[in-house]
Structure formats: structure tokens, C-alpha cells
Amino acid sequence: MTLFSRRTLLSAASAALAAPALIAADEAAPHSEIAYGSDPRQKLDLYTRPGLKGAPVLMFVHGGGWSFGDKKAVNALPGFAERHGFLLASTGYRMAPDVNARGEAEDIASAAAWLFDHAAEHGGDPHRLFLMGHSAGAHLVALVGVDPKYLGAHDHDPSQLAGVIPVDGAGYDAPLQMEEAAKRPMLSKMYQAGFGAEAAALSPTLLVKKGGHYPPFLLFHVERRPDSREQAHKLADALTGAGGKAVVVSAPGETHMTINHSMGVAGDPEGERVAAFVKTGRL
């Protein structure tokens, strides 16, 4: 099983080097920074606009291998939200080595709970809250959408989410990924920092149970075989097998980084697919 190709890793490194320019451009979009916890990373950026009322809420969770990244890296999403009438939130969270994926998921749930409780004050509809994440962020939104203990700590439940949109994640079955990562020191270090000995307990695919009440999932993957493609399909199969709803969408021609950078650009097919889901709640 090939986790990442050398080309993909080089693309990721190039994108990381380019991140400051992307962040600087995104800071032009008006937003408010709001603390949902006491840690400096426990803050979200809320992209509000005058006259917004009862709007669907899209909460974005950045990637970065569970170890790095920034909530400012929203790329085209502010303009996307404005065009389609959404309230956009981009959340920060604690990262490894301070916490593993469990602590990160706890933060994502805390940010979502804040939006459940306060989105209406900023023009959003808390009954139409969608979680979207890229890469490690895709894993985290899936985990919060599947395991009820995270939102349950805030007297909420995953079934209250209008939808979950994981974008090219590959950690939904972490033990499977870690088998291959063990052969590659850099990837092994990344997964060990994110999961450690808790891989199975932090794997959305392995946590889906029949009789569970799950929000609908719209999963995107690029053609990174077998990891992102197979991982997306296995999670979707687990959800539908348990009576839930899930659709998997392939993004031909996109890479792990370009699907994130182009998401929400006018005319981008993946962004338009997300917009249709968020507007209607239907897969």
C-alpha cells in the first residue's frame, strides 16, 4: 500500500512554503477572531457580513498532519461563502506534540458547540451546521461526526450536524495507514504524533456502529491510490452499512494540495458540489 508518492510529498512541501502568501491574501476578507477555549490556539475566525440571517454555517478545519497549520489558510472559502450566502467559520485547534488527535477532536467539537450556541447571533442557522476539513482536518471532522463523545461533552450530538465534508483525508482507518507509515520514518513520525497507541480508538471507520445516528457525509478524494480513495470508500461503506448516508466524490486532475486551494473558486466543480449540499442538505 502506498501512502503518499514522492511527488505528493514534494507538492505538500511546496505548498507549505507558499502558505504565507496564501494567508496574507486571505486576511483581506473581513472576519472576527473568537475564543472558544482558554488555549491560544482555541480560536475561530468568523466571516460575518451585514444582513446575513438564517444562513447555513460552514465550519472549516485546516490540515497539517495533526502537527501544523493555521486557521487563516482558508484559500478561496471567504468569497465562496459570500457568493452562496453561507456563514463561514475557520477554526484553530491545539496540535501535536501538545495533544494527539483526541485532543484535537475535542477542540473541533468545542468550536462546533460554540457555533451551535452562538451562530444565530451572527446570522447563521445552528440547525444547518456543516463541518468541512482537509487532510488531517478531514479526519478530525469525520471523527467528531461519528463518535458521539466529543459533541456529547457539550450536550450536543453528531446527529445535530447538517453534514460532514471530509476532503482528501487518509486517516479514517488509522491502523491501516500506520502499517505502511512504519516503513517511512517521516510518515511514521507524523502518525505517531497524531495517534500514538490510540489509532483504533481514533479511527472513524472503525467507530461506526449499526443503530448509530450520523449526519450525512460528502467525502472527496483525489486519485491517491490506495489511501485516500480506499479510505473514503471504506468510511462511506461503514456509514451506509450502519444505515447512514454517505456519498464519495472523486476529483480527477486534482492533487492533495490543489483540491484544497481550489475549493470554492468560482466554477470549481468540487466547490459547487459542496455548495449544493450545504444549500439543500441533500446528497
Image (cartoon, rainbow, N blue to C red):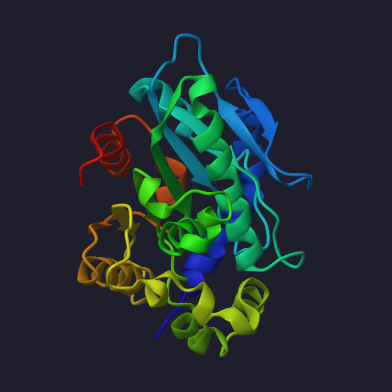
Q: Which residue is depicted at the point 55% across and 65% down?
A: 10
Residue 208 against residue 283 in the figure, above or below = below
What residue is rendered at 38% in x and 21% in y?
54
The residue depicted at 30 percent of the width and 35 percent of the height is 275
Residue 239 at what x, y percent from top left? 28, 66
Could you say which is closer to the camera, residue 213 or residue 83?
213
Vertical placement of residue 241 versus 42, above or below: below
Judging depth in this view, the residue of 213 and 65 nearest the camera is 213
Can you say whether 114 is above or below 159 in the image? above
Quadrant of the frame with the N terminus: bottom left
Picture quadrant where residue 130 is located: top left
270 vs 100, left or right, is left
Q: Which residue lies furthest to the top in this view?
A: 51
Residue at 34% x, 61% y is: 222
Q: Is 281 placed left or right of 88 in the picture? A: left
Image vertical order of residue 249 relative to residue 1, above or below:
above
Residue 149 picture location, percent across and down: 52, 62
Q: Position of residue 169 (x, y in %)?
A: 43, 63
User: Residue 173 in the image: x percent, y percent?
Assistant: 43, 77
Tally of numbered tags: 0
User: In this orientation, which residue lies closer to the viewer: 15 or 231?
Assistant: 231
Question: In the displayed image of the protein, which residue is found farthest to the front?
Answer: 155
Q: In this view, does 7 lie to the left or right of 54?
A: right
